[in-house]
Amino acid sequence: MRLGGPIFKEGLDAEAWTQEVVAQGYRAAVCPVPLDADDSTIRAFAQAAANADIVIAEVGGWSNPLSGDPQTSAKALATCKAALVLAEKIGAPCAVNIAGSLGAKWDGPDERDLTEKTFDLIVQSVREIIDSVRPTRTCYTLETMPWMYPDSPDSYLRLIKAIDRKAFGVHFDPVNLICSPQRYFDNGALIREFIAQLGPHIRCCHAKDILLGTTLTVHLDEVRPGMGALDYRTFLREVNRLDRNTPILLEHLPSAEEYRLAAKHVRGVAQEEGIQL
C-alpha cells in the first residue's frame, strides 16, 4: 500500500515534481500532467516517477457521461477516453470518474440515478470508453458514491459482471459509501465486505473521513482523516491485504497543512498496525 496526495506547487518539471512528492513522504501521487500532455512530457514524468519509486495512482476524467445534454455527454465521453489513454501511457493503475448523473448537477443526487435504466446507461458508457481505447495495462474505474451507482459492494460487483470487460476495475472510497447512520456506525463491516467481494479488482483508494451531525434529520459531513468515525484500522488492514502497490490517496483538503495533518494521522494508525505506507 502506498500513501499519496496532491502537490500544491504548480509548473514543476518531472524531476522537481518527484522531489516534492518524496519531500511529502508520499510513495504515490495524482497524475501530474494534463490530459492533453504531449508524449515527451508523459514519458519524462513516467520515467522520473519510476526512478523515484513513485506510483502515479490515477488519472481523473471528471465529467458527466450521463448528462441529458448531448454536447455535454459527448464531451464527457471524450474526456474519459483521454484520461484512459493517458493512464495507459503514463503507467497509472487506473483512470477514474464517477458514473455521472441524469440530474442538473454532474455529481449530485437525482431520483433517476438509482434506477435500472440508468444502470444500463452506465454499462453502455463504460463499455464505449474501454472499447474505444482498449488499454492493456491500466483500467477504467468508477469511484464509489452515496447516491449513484456504484453505491455498494453488490452494485459494484453487478456492474463488473454487466460491463464484462477486463479493463474495468474498482476505485474504493469508503467514505462515499457511508450514506446512513447504519453504515456510519458499522463502517468497519462495510469495508470488510467491500474488500471481500471486490479486493482483486481494486486499483486505487481515496482516504477521507466522515462525521455524523447531531441535528435532525441526518447530516453527514466529510472531514479530515482523524476527525471523524471512519474505521481507519480496518480500512488500512484490509487494503494492506491487496497488491502491495495499491495507492491510497488523500483528497479534498484545503491546504498543505491540512494534508500534513491528515497524512500524520493515517501514518500513525498504520504504524500502530505494523503497516508500511
Image (cartoon, grey):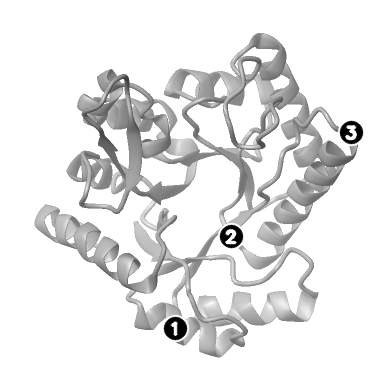
As drawn, the label of residue 247 is: none
Say which amino acid is labelled 3.
Pro
Say which amino acid is labelled 1.
Glu
Residue 195 percent across, percent down from the top left: 36, 33
247 w.r.t. 20: above or below: above
Quarter of the figure with residue 194: top left
Q: CA distance from mark 3 to mark 2?
A: 30 Å
As drawn, the label of residue 20 is: 1
Q: Is residue 277 visible?
A: no
Discs 2/1, front: 1
Whichever of labels 2 and 1 marks the residue nearer the N terminus, that label is 1
Q: Which residue is mark 3?
A: 70
170 w.r.t. 91: above or below: above
Label 3 packing within 10 angstroms: few (<14), some (14-19), many (20+)? few
Residue lying farthest to the front in this orientation? 215
Which sits in the foreground, 218 or 260? 218
Label 1 packing within 10 angstroms: few (<14), some (14-19), many (20+)? some
Residue 75 percent across, percent down from the top left: 84, 46
Residue drawn at the location 28% of the way across and 61% of the way down: 262
Q: CA distance from mark 3 to mark 1?
A: 41 Å
Residue drawn at the location 25% of the way across and 66% of the way down: 261
